[in-house]
Image (cartoon, coloured by chain):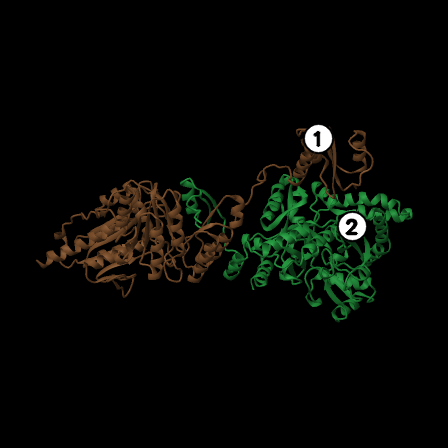
């Protein structure tokens, strides 16, 4: 049985062409025999009456919109009316982005309008604005990587509390590196995907572990950064705990690696308890920590970043870890002059400098640093080396008003020349970091400086020892960088730890040779 | 509650663009922001803004305010006299545009208009006496906005002046505006010569009663359908009212014809209305004011309910911040000048007419009126781009007023102070340019922007209001 319907939409104007289009659209719906959507003017009402769509009077004014329908049954009429309302409410239903160009998004909210499915904010604004952007991102439901540094500790605590309350992961502040589901964030290396998940308080620490895993033929599920202060008592390891939960539940992750300086005791207990509860093999590399304080219940302690990678590889392959190889390159120390004694390490990666300080200070007496650790002693003047010296050129006092040494090699090159001119220097120790964000061709930047340094040494022999942190798929290409540096006579070790041990061995061998 | 490791990453990159390139190169989805520090780089305010993002009090308050705004059905109900119609209108009170301003601070056109209004009310014999009286403290000055009214340019309303009454048919609330005198020498530009005063007297004695009769016979005119149609016809009902004025006259003319006026009086009324393409402007303003007043006073709401200028200061009011004005120095206008005039002759931004932008008309609906961008040498694409840009600082879109150039999407409306500060996008305003000297009149038209500093102050106040 046919059903007639009439609906008045008060006080709604649409121009006649639009209404004709809507009428045609509604009339074409299944089960609709006739449809007319018009402004309720006297003229239109008369037309509807003539067409037999309207009987008698309607309580509508010319500023009202009138929908009249004849449909095969009530259900079809109801559906047609609903469709009419939807069409009236929704413009033409065309693409909202057709026509003139939208401006580039300026705020996180505009970013979400442009990419509604976004779930992550990577923030690298100047530090003074970074906390506000991170807080906004969290309140908008986004996970956050806060690359920016110079964020106050109290802001970090506040942000992590907010993230915790919302079930979100906040990496950083001062989180240089992360890899999430194969996507590199910040200064990351191009690492293949695989079964090993890494959580690190240090960017270069993460880069070393993930690169070594890639070089060994396996890959990384995720690498989460926590920022350098996460394991302090005030922050309580909030990010590391949250990241551990992620990796524990992640099916792609079979082995977990933790990288950090030794955490505050209470924080370490919490982190290790959570690590044990993950049910997965966990390798904890707390650089400089007592292994006895770390190991137990599925958690293994790694002394160096290289060991951490090797132990994780073994665990992922189901092999037992047999210890890392310690085959250090030979060096003919007879070419040194008698007074050449010292190692001078010039680092762009803070964690590399830290790890090398620990290792070097075990092997040599009188190690100095601008960021001393273990038995190392603080430099009187960071700009002048004394004895064995390792400097972190990425530390604040060197980067103020300057790009980071991973991007701009000038500061390190200048320092290399000064060290070379020092008659007591035997070994110059260097890190070379590849990956996204790093200099596009570090070897090309370093080679002229190495040549100039050899000239400055005025006939003395100089040992250049280093390692390259990177992968073949990095924009700079690992093999290309290694070949160029070897060509220039740089002794390249496989890792930071091996480079530091090599430097120490050369210095010790020369000292021993001198005594004979 | 792990969720990141198992989901596909979609990144918004705030800061170093090279990071976005690396993400894209690895096949990740990434949106790069064109970021600059919000809140004019004020770190404290930036944190306040962050704390107010997705705020548990502000979001529902804005929903409530915005719904109330959309829910108003303004009807042009009739004509009244300021002294009898307006609340708290004193006997010796003159209303003016914008936030409060004292006589000695007023700009030239406003002072001229006040002299004219004093003469019109016969409170003084000549201009000199009128100025003395204005300076004496015996005349009270008060913003139109404090009385439910709005007036373009100087916005002077005196007790004897006729007013439009716009009423919410869905609730009975009212808003008011004065009558538009036409272009050229007019009181709203500070002119007070005999011709100006004579026209005002005729408007009071002849025009207003005739229009009042016609409206009474019609029972009022629904304004939303009329404005919706005008937008389709190329108006933005602030600086371009050609279609709306015609549509209004089309509704009024038959009723005027039946009002039994002497033929010559009828002809004068029709001539006057037909001869002024901005006749509808004041009605547009009053209906905007009515809708926005419905949204005002919702605790916690960050929606702007008034933007207005007194020629010295630009001021805004915010729904959740009561009767306070947040002000900054009035800006200059970028526009085209009539022959013989230039930027050096221009007064600063002036008038209550930016109430239309506050409600989503004017600059916000510029896509509807591409003719307007010619004032700044723009193209129709520029007009559309302005409307698109305003979508990023508003709470939503009109469910009634559609913009053909935006594929019939609704006009962006309901300015959110948070979005203005977060994006740095200032509300765009289409406006006339007055001569800085009293009485010369309009010398051009163009575009200007609401200053960010009004919004930053309001944000600081809102933070205290909702987080204290």
> Residue B263: percent from the left, percent from the top?
90, 46
Residue A73, numbered label:
1
Query: Which residue is nearer to you in this view: A444 or A499?
Result: A499
Residue B389, numbered label:
none
Q: Which residue is mark 2?
A: B76
Q: Is residue A149 visible?
A: yes
> Residue A403: percent from the left, percent from the top?
37, 54
Rendered colour, chain B: green
In space, the residues marked 2 and 1 are separated at their CA atoms by 41 Å
Q: Quadrant of the C terminus of chain A?
A: bottom left
Q: Is residue B176 above or below residue B370?
A: below
Q: Which residue appears at 78% of the width and 54% of the height?
A: B165
Q: Chain of mark 1?
A: A
- From the viewer's perspective, is the residue at label 2 or at label 1 nearer? 1
Q: Which residue appears at 43% of the width and 48% of the height?
A: B2
Q: Chain of mark 2?
A: B
């Amino acid at each position: 049985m046919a059903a007639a319907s009439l609906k008045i939409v008060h006080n709604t104007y649409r121009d006649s062409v639009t209404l004709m289009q809507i009428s045609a659209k509604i009339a074409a719906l299944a089960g609709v025999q006739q449809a007319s959507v018009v402004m309720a003017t006297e003229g239109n009402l008369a037309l509807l009456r003539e067409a037999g769509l309207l009987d008698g009077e309607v309580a509508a004014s010319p500023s009202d919109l009138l929908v009249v329908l004849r449909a095969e049954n009530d259900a079809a009429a109801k559906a047609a009316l609903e469709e009419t309302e939807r069409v009236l409410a929704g413009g033409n239903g065309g693409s909202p982005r057709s026509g003139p160009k939208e401006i580039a998004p300026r705020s996180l909210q505009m970013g979400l309008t442009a990419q509604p499915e976004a779930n992550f904010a990577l923030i690298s604004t100047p530090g003074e604005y970074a906390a506000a952007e991170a807080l906004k991102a969290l309140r908008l439901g986004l996970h956050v990587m806060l690359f920016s540094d110079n964020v106050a500790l109290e802001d970090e605590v506040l942000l992590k509390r907010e993230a915790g309350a919302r079930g979100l992961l906040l990496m950083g502040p001062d989180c240089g590196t992360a890899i999430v589901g194969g996507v590199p964030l910040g200064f990351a290396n191009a690492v293949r995907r695989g079964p090993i998940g890494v959580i690190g308080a240090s960017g270069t620490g993460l880069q070393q572990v993930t690169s070594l895993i890639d070089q060994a033929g396996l890959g990384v599920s995720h690498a989460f950064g926590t920022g350098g202060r996460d394991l302090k008592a005030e922050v309580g390891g909030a990010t590391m705990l949250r990241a551990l939960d992620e990796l524990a539940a992640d099916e792609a992750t079979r082995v977990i690696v933790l990288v950090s300086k030794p955490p505050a005791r209470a924080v370490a207990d919490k982190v290790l308890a959570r690590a044990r509860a993950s049910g997965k093999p966990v390798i904890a590399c707390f650089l400089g920590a007592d292994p006895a304080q770390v190991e137990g219940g599925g958690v293994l302690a790694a002394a160096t970043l290289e060991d951490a990678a090797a132990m994780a590889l073994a665990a992922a392959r189901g092999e037992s870890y047999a210890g890392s190889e310690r085959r250090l390159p030979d060096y003919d120390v007879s070419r040194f002059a008698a007074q050449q004694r010292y190692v001078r390490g010039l680092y762009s990666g803070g964690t590399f400098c830290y790890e090398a300080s620990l290792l070097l200070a075990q092997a040599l007496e009188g190690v100095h640093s601008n960021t001393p650790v273990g038995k190392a002693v603080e430099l009187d003047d960071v700009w002048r080396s004394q004895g064995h010296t390792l400097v972190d050129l990425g530390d604040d006092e060197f980067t103020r008003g300057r790009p980071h040494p991973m991007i701009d090699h000038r500061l390190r090159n200048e320092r290399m020349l000064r060290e070379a001119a020092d008659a007591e220097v035997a070994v110059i120790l260097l890190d070379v970091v590849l990956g996204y964000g790093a200099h596009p061709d570090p070897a090309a930047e370093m080679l002229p400086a190495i040549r100039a340094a050899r000239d400055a040494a005025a006939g003395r022999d100089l040992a250049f020892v280093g390692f390259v942190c990177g992968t073949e798929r990095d924009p700079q290409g690992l093999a290309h960088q290694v070949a160029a540096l070897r060509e220039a006579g740089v002794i390249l070790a496989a890792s930071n730890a091996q480079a530091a041990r090599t430097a120490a061995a050369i210095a010790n061998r020369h000292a021993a040779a001198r005594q004979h | 509650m792990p969720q990141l490791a198992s989901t596909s990453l979609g990144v918004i990159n705030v800061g170093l663009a090279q990071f976005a390139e690396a993400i894209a190169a690895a096949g990740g989805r990434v949106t790069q922001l064109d970021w600059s520090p919000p809140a004019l780089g004020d770190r404290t305010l930036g944190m306040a803004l962050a704390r107010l993002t997705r705020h548990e009090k502000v979001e529902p308050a804005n929903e409530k305010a915005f719904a109330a705004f959309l829910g108003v059905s303004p009807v042009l109900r009739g004509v009244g006299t300021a002294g009898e119609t307006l609340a708290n209108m004193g006997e010796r009170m003159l209303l003016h545009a914008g936030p409060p301003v004292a006589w000695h601070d007023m700009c030239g056109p406003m002072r001229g208009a006040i002299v004219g209004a004093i003469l019109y009310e016969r409170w003084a014999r000549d201009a000199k006496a009128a100025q003395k009286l204005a300076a004496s403290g015996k005349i009270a000055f008060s913003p139109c906005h404090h009385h439910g009214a709005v007036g373009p340019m100087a916005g002077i309303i005196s007790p004897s002046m006729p007013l439009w009454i716009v009423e919410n048919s869905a609730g009975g609330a009212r808003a008011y505006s004065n009558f538009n005198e036409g272009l050229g020498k007019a009181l709203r530009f500070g002119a007070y010569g005999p011709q100006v005063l004579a026209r005002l007297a005729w408007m009071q004695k002849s025009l207003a009663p005739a229009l009042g009769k016609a409206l009474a016979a019609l029972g009022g005119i629904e304004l939303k359908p009329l404005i919706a149609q005008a937008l389709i016809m190329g108006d933005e009902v602030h600086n371009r009212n050609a279609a709306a004025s015609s549509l209004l006259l089309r509704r009024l003319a038959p009723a005027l014809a039946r009002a039994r006026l002497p033929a010559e009086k009828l002809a004068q009324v029709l001539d006057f209305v037909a001869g002024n393409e901005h006749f509808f402007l004041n009605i547009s303003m009053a209906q905007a004011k009515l809708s926005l007043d419905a949204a005002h006073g919702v605790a916690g709401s960050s929606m702007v309910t008034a933007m207005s200028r007194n020629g010295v200061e630009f001021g805004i009011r915010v729904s959740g911040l009561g009767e306070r004005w947040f002000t900054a120095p009035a800006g200059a206008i970028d526009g085209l000048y009539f022959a013989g005039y230039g930027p050096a002759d221009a007064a600063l931004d002036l008038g209550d007419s930016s109430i239309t932008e506050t409600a989503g008309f004017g600059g916000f609906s510029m896509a509807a009126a591409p003719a307007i961008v010619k004032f700044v040498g723009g193209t129709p694409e520029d007009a559309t781009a302005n409307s698109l840009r305003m979508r990023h600082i508003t709470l939503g879109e009109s469910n009634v007023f559609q913009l053909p150039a935006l594929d019939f999407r609704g006009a962006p409306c309901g300015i959110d102070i948070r979005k203005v500060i977060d994006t740095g996008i200032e509300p765009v305003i289409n406006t006339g340019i007055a001569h800085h000297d009293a009485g010369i009149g309009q010398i051009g038209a163009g575009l200007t922007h609401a200053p960010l500093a009004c919004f930053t102050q309001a944000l600081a106040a809102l933070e205290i209001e909702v987080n204290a």
